[in-house]
Image: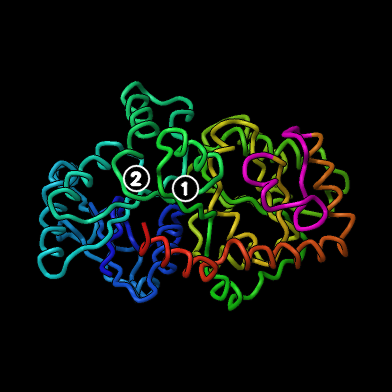
Amino acid sequence: MRILFCGLSGIPNKNSAPINRYLALAQAMSLNNEIIFINRVPIREQSQYKTEDDCKDFKIIDATGIKYRPKSFIKRNILKISSFIHEFRTIRKINQEKKIDWLNVYTQFFGICFFYFLLSKLFNFKIILHYVEFRSKIKNRNILFQVNDYLFDHYAIQLCDKIIPISSFLNEHVKKIKSSAKTLLIPPICDFEYFDKIKPELSPKKYFIFCGSASYIEILSFILESYIKIKDRDQIDLHLVISGKISDQTIVQIIDEHSSSIKIFSNIDYDKLISKYKGALAQLIPLRNTIQDNARFPQKICEYLASHRPIITTNFGEIPYYFVDAKNAVISEDFTTGSYAKKLTWAIQNPEKLQTISSNSYEIGKNSFEIKSYSIKLKRFLEYD
């Protein structure tokens, strides 16, 4: 079958969680299929991603014909406005060469979903929607985004033939909206063999690690306050791998006050990031008891598990479906700094138990969060109604 992956731009880019998921699903879907990625608009800087070896098994097409992000503000916005025309022509040409069977859609915009829906009627292919977040519950969105998010969560489902939700919450939501919907729940997945080839970072001092965006203010604040509360803090550092600039002054002040033990990293190579994951005592990924966190399932989960190190998390969202405290993860029952700090302290004081948890978490990762676990399932998903 000829299968397109559309909606995202910047492929390949291993520092992007959405693209990592898309690439992993493409790899799982590639069994006896032809995979083609379409970059809607050029967003990559010319100095970045000098090789496409990470995507060598797939064909990548830049719909606009321009590979790198133009320096001109005017040209960039002209390309955004005209991107629908460019992508229409690209998909039409691909379909003329050989019939398109499936088109995958990964986007946050309802309008883009509707665009692909129209193309599916014109060129007679089927659509798979990748559903990764309950957008209606994202806070601090302007009115236009609020309208978009409502339409996406309630009507995008109607515009596709099959759906791949990332969580049980989203799968249940889809069934409420459209009881006949054909879904396949796939959590975050990655290539464990790739991770196995990378050596752990050697550090003179033990450390916890968290990787996330500077915009995750509540999570960053929670992790910092929990870390400051732990006993035996002199035995362990906190490494924060942050994308973007931290603007919250309270967070900046905490980091400055504890700069001897809290280290900030940014713009690091993906293989270096994996090395840091593998060298950590444990990896921090607290989830809040909110609809947004119950619906999403961070891509970092599979990467953490593939790194052969345990996660320290909270018992919300998808976590109870896969993990048990002290068996294959370290789990705080509450999203409170006091409770989480106790789990951090426990991890420091119980290295032998942590090693057992690490082995168990790697095994569940291989069974439920590894690309190869879904190749046959996706083959059947595509072939049968």
Q: Is residue 77 magenta?
A: no
Provide residue 364's location: percent of width, then percent of height: 68, 63
User: Residue 131, how many percent across, how many down?
Assistant: 43, 45
Earlier-in-chain disc, 2 versus 1: 2
Can you tell which mark lies on residue 165? 1
Instruction: Give the magenta-colored segment's residue range.
Output: 316-337
Q: Is residue 332 above or below residue 10?
A: above
| 2 and 1 marks in contact (CB < 8 Å) | no
Q: How far apart in space, not on screen, are marks 2 and 1 (Cα)?
A: 13 Å
Quadrant of the image occupied by residue 273 = bottom right
Horizontal side of 364 relative to 355 (left or right) equals left
Q: Indicate how the structure is coloured in the image.
A: rainbow
Q: Quick check: can you spot residue 65?
A: yes
Q: Residue 305: x and y, percent?
A: 65, 62
Above or below, 192 against 227 in this view is: below
Pick the residue in front: 135 or 164: 164
Figure quadrant of residue 203: bottom right
Q: Kindly report which numbered mark, 2 or 1, lies closer to the viewer in this rendering.
A: 1
The residue under label 2 is: 107
Is the residue marked by circle 2 packed among few (<14), some (14-19), or many (20+) residues within 10 Å?
some
Q: Position of 202 compared to 172: left or right?
A: right
Name of the residue lying farthest toward the top: 143
